[in-house]
Amino acid sequence: MRPFDSADPHGFLAAFFTAFHHDLTHGDEDAGTVVDRYHTPDVVQFADGHRMDRDKLIAHTRPTRKHKPSLGVEVHDALADGDRIAARYTLHVRDRGRDLDVEVSFFGRFAPEGRLRSAHMLTRALPRKQEDAA
């Protein structure tokens, strides 16, 4: 079965990132165990041109585990075809008293059980509204 046959791609993607973040920040499992639950062993991600394999992804989680930022995921557009999903979403992050909104253009492939196997992401920080910055 393909991951998106019965799942709404908007909901699937929001649930994927929310659950991964929650397990990283609220659990006491090893980071590698959490990464492996959500990603295939051969995962490769490109974020703004930077390549991350499994080991680099685990290293990338260390600040998240240490600082425990809050995360909201707002999926604006999402299309799925077989094991692929293309989406545009905004991450709303609150970290150490600072708010940050990041828009992401995401192109990914998922394994049949729903783990991420590859992704290409382009990101941009969104400007804060004047009333939000105060």
Image: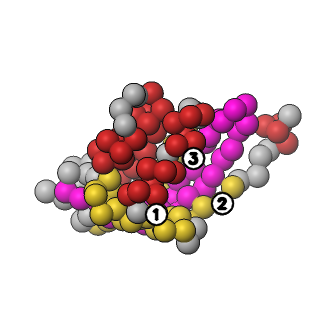
- Disc 2 marks a residue whose amino acid type is Arg
Depth check: 43 or 29 in front?
29
Residue 101 point in image, percent of width and height:
66, 47
| Mark 1 and mark 3 residues within 8 Å of each other at the beta carbon | no
Query: From this viewpoint, which residue is outermost toward the bottom?
Result: 49
Q: Quadrant of the N terminus?
A: bottom left
Q: CA distance from mark 2 to mark 3?
A: 10 Å
Depth check: 79 or 28 in front?
28
Nearest to N terminus: mark 1 or mark 3: 1
Q: Quadrant of the C terminus?
A: top right
Residue range highlighted in magenta: 86-112
* Residue identifier under label 3: 91
Q: Residue 119 sits in which quadrant?
A: bottom left
The label nearer to you, 2 versus 1, is 1
Judging from the image, the colouring scheme is: secondary structure
| Residue drawn at point x = 40 percent, y = 28 percent | 27
In the displayed structure, 23 sits above or below 124; it is above
- Disc 3 marks a residue whose amino acid type is Leu
Depth check: 70 or 82 in front?
70
Mark 3 is surrounded, within 10 Å at the Cα level, by few (under 14), some (14 to 19) or many (20 or more) other residues, namely: many
Mark 2 is surrounded, within 10 Å at the Cα level, by few (under 14), some (14 to 19) or many (20 or more) other residues, namely: few
* Residue identifier under label 2: 124
Query: Is residue 85 shown to the viewer in this render?
Result: no
| Mark 2 and mark 1 residues within 8 Å of each other at the beta carbon | no
Q: Residue 84 sits in which quadrant?
A: bottom left
Residue 56 point in image, percent of width and height:
46, 58
* Residue identifier under label 1: 52
